[in-house]
Image: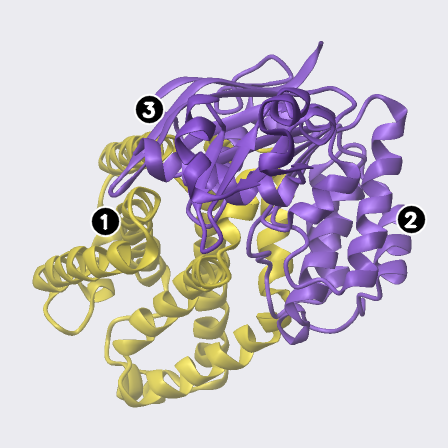
């Protein structure tokens, strides 16, 4: 599968935090959901993809090229929304758009005007007077207005009202319909991804815990809830996650059929949601570390 | 690079109207303490660059700019061109206001107010450009190597040393007085001075590009 973005064994060391040999890719024409708690390394990965920071090992390729070496060319094909959308706060949305427009050969001023109108971004008000959600909407409009082939969205739904979140997810789904646009969507709101993502990447504490098709999780993975007496038996199954609760134990396993066969009526076996994966894989990480 | 320069112009556009009245203030100040005209005009000219840098730092826009389809080298080059353009504009204003004052005041009044040295004349503008240029090529590598607060602190020390050295050449009365004999220097010496300045500028730019390309944003 042709990749728009590929991380191969990427490593980055900071004081007190390290990304450890992370590998995954964003195939062309697909949405990849990047999930993980605060401080997991999601923003670091997006900065690496934009060439804003250097890796300490491994490689990152955007459209087959190193973003730090071929930055200008490939960044024209990238739309980005940073974690805390920052602009020249004293300028209006209209002026911010006017500053950004000349940098992008494919900038569509009509589209930008239409997007900020549809998103309800006041064109002539200073950005500093806009709410966090509205600033994010502006950032999204800027990212979409130059018809990017790769969208790097770092927590784009934070601060957005549910109605706009729905709208944004719908737009992203429609965008990839051309088979040409790819999206890396970082978030902690896993419900967003359940609807639109094709692939899921889960990281925690700088480690890759899972990378694969979302449907694999939703179709095959299971959460097994059982009494504490089954803890050892569940652990022997090699679960993706195992945690102790007041009621007993919860385990995240990859094969729902096998879980049902082995535990039958002794445990409650349910299809896993992304929320389950997000929460329980955190436990695996803690246990491994 | 022209898009980056256009960005700088758009950023300060809301404040452009301040430039002319600010220089008028400098003129009034010059009538009281003439030697300050040079330094105040310099501060205004460099303020262009300082304002843009401060705006981008305070809004964390440097990360956004670096995410745009431009190379780090282009960002550095544009910053130098923008800073030197601001300095050139400042030099023009420095001359214009100086000559304007000279045009309306009697020579006796000028001598009384400004002393013998012609602060609006050629020597003055040479001093203006020389000091401004030195400050720019010292500050920008620091800026591209460190974040703004640290760069500004280091720059304050280095600028203090630069200005002190300039004043030591001419006394507190101002660098322009120290260069009052500049017009009597021959062409070879001028060319050599310009060549050295250009070489230092190229080195400063090269250093800034290296620093900025290796910096994490």
At horizontal 74% and vertical 62% (from top left) the residue drawn is A93
Q: Which circle marks residue A110 in the picture?
A: 2
Answer with mark 2 or mark 3, whichever residue precedes in sequence.
3
Closest to the camera, between mark 2 and mark 3, is 3
Whole-number angstrom distance, CA of label 2 to CA of label 1: 60 Å
Confirm whether circles 2 and 1 share one chain.
Answer: no
At horizontal 47% and vertical 77% (from top left) the residue drawn is B23
Q: Is residue A148 left or right of residue A190?
A: right
Please name the residue that numbered disc 3 is placed on.
A56
- In x, y percent, where is residue A109? 86, 47
Q: Secondary structure at mark 1?
A: helix
Whole-number angstrom distance, CA of label 2 to CA of label 3: 42 Å
Confirm whether circles 3 and 1 share one chain.
Answer: no
- In x, y percent, where is residue B144? 35, 43
**Dot 1: few (<14), some (14–19), or many (≥20) neighbours within 10 Å?**
few
Q: Which chain is yellow?
A: B
Query: Of A18 and B115, which appears nearest the observer?
Result: A18
At horizontal 42% and vertical 35% (from top left) the residue drawn is A231
Q: Chain of mark 1?
A: B
Image marks 3 and 1: residues in contact by CB distance under 8 Å: no
Closest to the camera, between mark 3 and mark 1, is 3
| Image quarter of the C terminus of chain A | top left
Q: Which chain is purple?
A: A
Query: Of B170 and A94, which appears nearest the observer?
Result: A94
Q: Secondary structure at mark 3?
A: loop
Q: Is residue B80 left or right of residue A135?
A: left
Q: Is residue A198 visible?
A: yes
């Amino acid at each position: 599968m042709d990749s728009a973005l590929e991380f191969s064994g990427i490593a980055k060391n900071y004081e007190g935090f390290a990304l450890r040999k992370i590998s995954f890719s964003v195939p062309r024409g697909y949405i990849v959901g990047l999930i993980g708690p605060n401080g997991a390394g999601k923003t670091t990965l997006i900065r690496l993809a934009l060439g804003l920071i250097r890796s300490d090992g491994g490689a990152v390729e955007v459209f087959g090229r190193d973003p730090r070496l071929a930055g200008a060319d490939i960044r024209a094909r990238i739309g980005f929304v940073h974690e805390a959308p920052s602009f020249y706060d004293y300028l209006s949305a209209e002026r911010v758009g006017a500053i950004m427009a000349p940098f992008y050969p494919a900038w569509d001023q009509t589209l930008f005007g239409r997007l900020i109108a549809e998103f309800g971004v006041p064109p002539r008000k200073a950005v500093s007077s806009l709410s966090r959600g509205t600033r994010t909407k502006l950032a999204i409009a800027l990212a979409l207005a130059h018809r990017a082939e790769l969208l790097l969205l770092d927590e784009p739904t934070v601060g957005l009202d549910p109605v706009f979140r729905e709208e944004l997810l719908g737009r992203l789904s429609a965008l990839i319909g051309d088979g040409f646009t790819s999206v890396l969507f970082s978030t902690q709101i896993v419900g967003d991804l359940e609807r639109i993502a094709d692939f899921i990447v889960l990281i925690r504490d700088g480690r890759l815990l899972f990378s694969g098709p979302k449907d694999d999780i939703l179709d095959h993975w299971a959460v097994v809830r059982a009494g504490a007496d089954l803890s050892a038996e569940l652990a022997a199954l090699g679960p993706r996650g195992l945690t102790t609760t007041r009621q007993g134990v919860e385990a995240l396993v990859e094969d729902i059929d096998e879980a049902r066969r082995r535990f039958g009526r002794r445990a409650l076996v349910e299809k896993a949601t992304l929320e389950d994966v997000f929460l329980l894989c955190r436990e695996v990480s803690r246990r491994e570390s | 690079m022209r898009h980056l320069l256009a960005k700088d112009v758009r950023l300060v556009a809301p404040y452009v109207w301040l430039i002319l009245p600010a220089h008028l203030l400098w003129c009034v100040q010059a009538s009281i303490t003439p030697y300050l005209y040079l330094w105040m005009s310099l501060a205004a000219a460099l303020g262009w660059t300082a304002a843009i840098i401060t705006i981008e730092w305070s809004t964390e826009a440097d990360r956004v700019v670096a995410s745009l389809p431009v190379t780090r080298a282009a960002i550095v080059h544009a910053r130098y061109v923008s800073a030197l353009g601001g300095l050139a504009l400042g030099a023009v204003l420095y001359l214009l206001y100086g000559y304007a004052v000279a045009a309306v005041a009697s020579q006796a009044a000028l001598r009384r107010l400004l002393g013998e040295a012609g602060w609006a004349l050629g020597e003055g503008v040479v001093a203006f450009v020389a000091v401004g240029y030195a400050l720019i090529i010292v500050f920008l590598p620091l800026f591209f190597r460190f974040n703004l607060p640290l760069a500004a602190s280091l720059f304050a020390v280095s600028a203090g040393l630069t200005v002190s050295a300039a004043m030591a050449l001419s006394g507190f009365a101002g660098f322009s007085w120290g260069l009052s004999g500049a017009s009597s220097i021959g062409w070879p010496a001028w060319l050599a001075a310009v060549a050295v300045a250009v070489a230092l500028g190229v080195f400063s730019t090269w250093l800034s590009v290296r620093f900025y390309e290796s910096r994490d944003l």
